[in-house]
Image: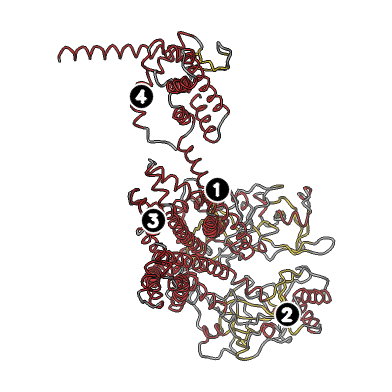
Amino acid sequence: MSKGNAAADKKSEILQGTLDLMVLKTLQAMGPLHGFGIARRLEQLSEEILRLNEGTVYTSLLRLQQQGWIESEWGASENNRKARFYSITKSGLKQLAKETENWERISGVIGRVLRVGARTS
Amino acid sequence: MRSLGNFFGRLRRTIRNEPRDLEFAAEVKAHIDSLAERYRRQGMTEREAEEAARRQFGNTVSLEENRRAMLTFPSIDGLRSDLIFAVRMLRKNPAFAVAVTLTLALGIAANSAIFSLCNAVLFKPLPYRDPDRIVVLWETLRDGKPITVAPANYFDWRNTNRSFDDVAAVRSTSGFTLASQAESVRLTGAAVSANFFSLLGIRFALGRGFLPKEDQPGLNHAAILSYRTWEQEFGGDKDTIGKTIRLSDDIYKIVGVLPADFQFATNAADFQARSQIDVWAPLPINPEKISRGTHPLRVIARLKPGVDLAQAQAELNVLGANLARMYPADNKDKGILAVPIARQVTSNVRVALQALAVAVGLVLLIACANVANLLLSRAVARQREIAVRLALGATRSRLAQQLVTESLLLAALGGIAGLGLSALTIRAISRLLPADLSRAAGVALDARVLGFTAAISLLAGILFGLGPLFGTRNGSPGESLKQTNRLAGGGPSALRSALAVSQIAIAMILLTGAALMAKSFWALIHVAPGFRTESILTARLSLPQSRYSDNRKIGAFERQVLQDLRNRPGVQSAGFATYLPLSGSDNGWAFFIEGRPPLPVGTFDFAKYRPVSEGYFETLGIPLLRGRLFTSADVADSPWVVVINESMARQFWGWKNPIGDRLHFDGPTLRTVIGVVGDVRHEGLEGEPSSEMYMPVDQAANLENGPTIVVRTALDTSAAAATVREAVSAVDRQFPVDRIDTMDELLSRSVAQPRFRTMILMAVSILALVMASIGIYGVISYLTAQRTREFGIRLSLGATPGAVLRLVLGRAASLIAVGVCLGLGGAVIVARLIATLLFQTPALDRLAFAAASAVLIAVAFAASYVPARRAMRADPMLALRDE
């Protein structure tokens, strides 16, 4: 039974976008990783974002996979457990470059706007 | 490509769960385990570590839900669970499921059966290339009545029109006798212009069509066989093409075999199997020697690309006017009419089928109302469930989806059961089919019927599914929760009453229609045909033209056969006719009465023409009103005589005595009127008798070598037929004897179509009556059940049971009265629409309307009486204790 979660979806839109970007970047930087590994890496970089909701990494992975930006295969983890390893694809690399540029431009603009706002107030 | 792959992946996963779901669960578990392990290493207890890990990972259920939503189509996914739920609900309440399914099945079966009939007769394209470009051309009389075409006019149309690619003609012939080794076989035949088959666009099963020159006089010795004849008479042998055969003393070369599904008809009656043509021969027409005065041809034409019917008709109007000016003797006041062949073929059954289609549509509405009523009762019972779900956060639209799913499931069940039922109905119907409704290929459950059934099931599901939605819409969940079942639902009862009223109204319309049809049919079958039909056997002979080359020989043969027959046991009397009543064969002749002033050019007196033998009138019991009948002394060399019928005497002699007056045909020979006999309804019971003149076969104006014998006998059909065969072969060798029928069969066949539509409509309206009664029964039971407490209190306070009964029946009576009044209004409209189908019955026939109302009121009242009795016996204590 589906719930009326349209509002929740809207709120997390930005987070979703940034999480996807971070996961993609992580895979580009670190090479093939499993979900747990990605979570650890993101934890290292920023404790805040994933503190209580590591499961969202999997939603993000699924989304990226549906876009064709990453792919996955089964392999053995460090402690010899069976695990699914995700790696970035060629179109994923392209998308990452595009998104990174985009992000930098937008964050630059937003940063400038916020600074201007600070001065006038 | 990827998105397409996703789409199918989603669809697949929507339909079933996949191993990948298990893998995902394993992945999540491994993740949580790893987290927990880390916490354990930090020194937490097993339990603490597990909890912390879970907290850090987040809600796995909502993760799984999100995942499912991304991987599947959530609304369909919801549908799946709804369906499972719906099936479970139905299983819990099988009586309800059966009642709904059965009600729907009856309504749907009636509809798909009638639809399959319409499909076969009205919708299925005729088996020609671009059949909608083919028209039938008629000459029209001054009053617009279409008649068949004169050869000279056909030639002129063909040569001067600019609207048609091609114009072809077909003429029925008396058929052929195929001489084979064992015995000769009688085959039906038609003659066609050489372009006939190419105009229709026929692909031959074998061989070819006629070549352009093959309809020239002298070159016309090619023949084309129907598929059935090829199989039956030639064993389906491929070498048949090129063979020469002897057909009625002429040699023909077989050039082609038609495809199995080929049919040709210019009216629906021609589609009966027996009048389908066995052998097609070219129609030789010599343009030098053709007439405008006889009208033997049926003409078809194919519209040129880009020319529409209206343009073609406009041109034909001009053409017709020109021909009328050029040939006033024959064509004065005549016009030309083009009718699309599909409309032509179905013209006499269209209204009847439309009426039946409307009738079954109304029955389905009643069925839907019944199901809506049942669903309403259940919705009231489920109001608490629905309230609980609303309170727990289900959206209204989600609940609506659930309810619609349930209705659609019911509709699907009803549709499937209905399909099974309609397969049976169709089988029963095709046995009852009158000839002019059976387009030989027949009525079947094909893809279109299946599609139609699915569509009306869906429509029905939505229709009755809406009822409960209206019923449960209002009221907040809290209120419903506080209420008990028994007191819930004031709104639905108004809706229920409305449903019951509309059911009664619809049933009223159908019953009135059926009553009108029944009365009309009753009137029809009580028309006196003017001749005896019991214990009469009829059979057609075909005398080879080589040995029976003139009417003198034919007359002599007939007298010998009659002589022989009358000495055989079981034969009471016998005679010969050329055009038998109700057989579909007919002919007419122009005549002039001696001593009357000449008529204007182009006009003449006209009567039906009937060569008969002595004994014919006696055998068919046609009464002699004046003068005398033919005897065996009326032969070619005796004075020429005619017997006329009452209508002819009245029309041409008025009150004067016609006996002794003389008349002649186109030749100079004068024929003396010697007797007047009673009228006969030759074409069928519906038609008025026309003027007829009888003459001894020896004195006929045409060679009549296909006589029909009529025998009055106590023998059964096969014994009587054997007797006829023996008598014929005692006189000459065995001739083919075909079309063996009893007169009763011919009579019954002639009213087959009105009988069929009357029977179907009566069956349909009985169904409607039963369903509407169930409907009002349901509503009254519901109302009484609702007021049981009230009745209990009334009874305990001293009301008499009779008073309670009157209370309930009064309510029922008001519902019935409103329904009947509304229905009467609808019935008046419908009666006007079917007026053309009624025989000697006015559309607003008082008896039919009164009978229909009386039956409906009686049955509906009886249906309400049962629950009303129950109310009367309500035990006050029981009702009060229940509280």
Label 2 sits on a secondary structure element that is strand
Which residue is farthest top? A29
In the image, what residue type sits under mark 2? Val
What amino acid is at disc 3? Thr
Could you tell me which secondary element the residue under label 3 belongs to? loop
Say whether marks 2 and 3 touch (CB < 8 Å): no
Query: Which residue in the structure is indicated by mark 1?
Result: B130
Q: Mark 2 sits on what residue?
A: B711
Q: Where residue B177 appears, x then y in whole percent?
A: 75, 64
| CB atoms of marks 4 and 1 within 8 Å | no
Mark 2 Cα shell of 10 Å, populated few (<14), some (14-19), many (≥20):
many
Query: Please, which chain is the residue tagged with disc 1 on?
Result: B
Q: Foreground residue, B511 or B705?
A: B511
Real-space CA distance between mark 1 and mark 2, rounded to the nearest whole angstrom: 48 Å
Provide residue B543's location: percent of width, then percent of height: 76, 70
Q: Which residue is mark 3?
A: B484
Which SS class for mark 1? loop
Examine the rendered structure and indicate whether residue B543 appears above or below residue B287. below
| Whether labels 1 and 2 share one chain | yes
- Quarter location, residue A82: top right
Amino acid under label 4? Glu
Q: CA distance from mark 3 to mark 1?
A: 66 Å
Residue in front for this viewpoint, B79 or B62: B62
Place residue A24 in its image quadrant: top left
Q: Foreground mark, 4 or 1?
A: 4
Residue at point 57%, 30% (across, down): B18
Q: Does residue A70 sit above or below B309 in this rendering?
A: above
> CB under 8 Å between callouts 4 and 2?
no
Quadrant in which the C terminus of chain B appears: bottom left
Q: Earlier in the sequence, mark 2 or mark 3?
A: 3
Question: Disc 2 sits on a residue from what chain?
Answer: B
